[in-house]
Amino acid sequence: MIIPANLLKEVSKLKEQLNYHNYRYYVLDDPSIPDAEYDRLFLCLKELEKEYPQLVELDSPTQRVGAAPLSAFSQVTHKVPMLSLDNAFSDNDMRDFNRRLQDRLKSTEDIEYACEPKLDGIAISLLYIDGQLVQGATRGDGTTGENITQNVRTIPSIPLKLLGQDFPPALEVRGEIYMPKAGFGALNNRARAAGDKIFVNPRNAAAGSLRQLDSAITANRPLEMCAYSVGLVEGGDLPTQHTAALEQLHEWGFLINSEMRAVGNIEACIEYYQNLGVKRDDLAYDIDGIVFKVNDFNLQKTLGFVSRAPRWAIAYKFPAQEEMTQLLDVEFQVGRTGAVTPVARLDPVFVGGVTVSNATLHNRDEIDRLGVKVGDTVVVRRAGDVIPQVVSVVRSRRPETARDIVFPDTCPVCGSHVETVPGEVVARCTAGLVCAAQRKEAIKHFASRKAMDIDGLGDKLVELLVDEGLIDSMADLYHLQAQQVEKLERMGPRSAENLIAALHKSKQTTLDRFLYSLGIREVGEATARSLARYFGNLEKLITADEETLQQVDDVGPVVAHFISDFFIQPHNIEAVQALQDAGIQWQDIEVNEADEPLSGQTFVITGSFKVLKRSGAKAMLENLGAKVAGSVSVKTSMVVVGGGATNNSKYIKAQELGVATTDEPGLIELLTAHGAL
Ligand code: I6G
């Protein structure tokens, strides 16, 4: 079939436009057309390619969906070996590294370094001939890797064709393929819902996704690629500094790390490492260290290589977030709502910067999913503030003595029956406040900062007070005498007096704090606030039926049932009465629309503020009736972006969705206009 010249031109233009918009979206994170327009262009190209299949080329954006499955990956020999990096584990290792380089260079001058986070992903080589992606390969042993071209083609941030004209005719770009944390979470949620295998961490998920012989599977995985160096370069030149070379790669279409920068000396490298360590948990991706490279390519050349690693680079590692250890035993803890949770007792192991000896095993389903037995060697993960998790079992190390974990039929604390409600994964002790464990947890919750905020009444002291028989309920707290308390372990007359004073102070509270402190299932701070604001006083709430309860923000049928069920039970009403009799009081709320001019509006606060405290701004918005949410959606009324952070992801999302935004001065103006400031 003869193809008209204007059609060829149109297809080429469409491909160029789509590649460019793909780059704006996935690499620059700055789309310039709406998604619908992109979809329209994509459909146009797809239809033309359907009509004229001979026009389909490998650099077409329509070819990112995956190709016919392979039976095996072929092997690729790297023309320029893919090296590994030496590691540093302390500031002094870094200073030694710098000294070694200065000695070699016979100079005491400061060395300029390029600093970049070391992404926890899979190292990859991409070969471009005349600007076209012709090969993607894993690092393998550094000399030979696997040909995974079909798979890498499906990753949207990898250009199929380089942008611009001035690239070398042969260019090998190296970098890391990784799965961002958000994509990993969503992938595992989908897998959980479908009963499929769960990935233990983003790195494994990325590796598993790249190992697919069917690239259509890879195409459905949220992978990204970040370029960090070049290998083979023929027929053209690159800038003479590492950071400038990466900026050049960025212009040709690659994602590079936005944290990359050059610093003047080794002390600045150490400072960069410390700063990124603080930011580590907030990054959108996992990193396991920082890579420092001598920035000047000529100096790199002078320094050369030693065995399989460049002398001019080093990876300063962060504490590992995963380690292996032995599961010594499993104990069962009873929580505030009676949930019986299996807790792994571990041989203590240093992971994520702390020594971990306990980890949650969540519930029976999780134990089944892991297939874990007492005695097993397990992989423990502790990332950021998240409580330590057992993520997998090292089956090959299972001892013959390993034994099954047996879930108790009766409560390990009070001996009452444990039941699992059909459809729920959690097993619960049925004894309610009769169970000492549930009583203790309820009192701990009651005393906590966001509830009655009783200064000095921590978890240990609550345990002691219950174990010594001094209290049995929340109201008992208010009948404690200093003389009783001062006799307890680690207490004295002064701390006892302080506790009694703190208890006295807590009697003057607010309705929302009081509601939250009761520990009604699924009633968190936000719901307690909505309930207090809606009903204004306790009587109206106690007598509300489930239908009325559902009129309240955030209260659906399940939560309405828990609330109604709580207040139906005479012992709960008695507990509330006993607290009021002990002197707890609050001001009822006059529900007045004029006091809540932002009612029905949802705000999202992001970035750092100079004048206001974020928590203060949140409270003021809530007092004006607004809801303050954590993520941006079409329902968001306004996103407040502190610090002028226009590359802030929430700001970008707001732009995408057409949600209004303002900055800190704008928020101050709004709060002032409503008399909140
Ligand atoms: O494994 C690596 C991760 C990150 C690297 C690397 C890197 O730069 C940011 N750079 C080199 C030169 C090598 N491996 C060999």
Image (cartoon, grey):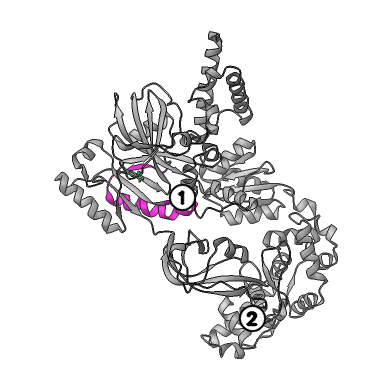
Q: Secondary structure at mark 1?
A: helix
Locate residue 620, reporting x and y percent.
Answer: 65, 54
The boundaries of the magenta stretch are 259-287
Comes first in the chain, label 1 or label 2: 1
Vertical placement of residue 43 versus 93, above or below: above
Ligand 1 shown in quarter = top left
Residue at screen point 50% across, 64% down: 388
| In this rendering, position of residue 241 left or right of residue 210 | left
Nearer the observer, 658 or 42: 42
Residue at screen point 39% across, 47% down: 117
Which quadrant: the N terminus? Answer: top right
What amino acid is labelled 2 in the image? Val
Nearer the observer, 302 or 45: 45
Locate residue 111, reporting x and y percent.
Answer: 24, 44
| In this rendering, position of residue 45 left or right of residue 593 | left
The answer to whether residue 511 is seen in the rendering is yes
Residue at screen point 66% across, 78% down: 411
Asked if the magenta segment contains residue 540, the reply would be no
The answer to whether residue 29 is seen in the rendering is no
Nearer the observer, 224 or 32: 224
Vertical placement of residue 553 versus 328, above or below: above
Asked if the magenta segment contains residue 280, the reply would be yes
Locate residue 151, reporting x and y percent.
Answer: 48, 37
The residue tagged 2 is 413
How many marks can you see?
A: 2
CA gap between label 1 and label 2 equals 40 Å
Labelled disc at residue 203: 1
What amino acid is labelled 1 in the image? Arg
- Which residue is the extreme one toward the left? 106
Labelled disc at residue 48: none
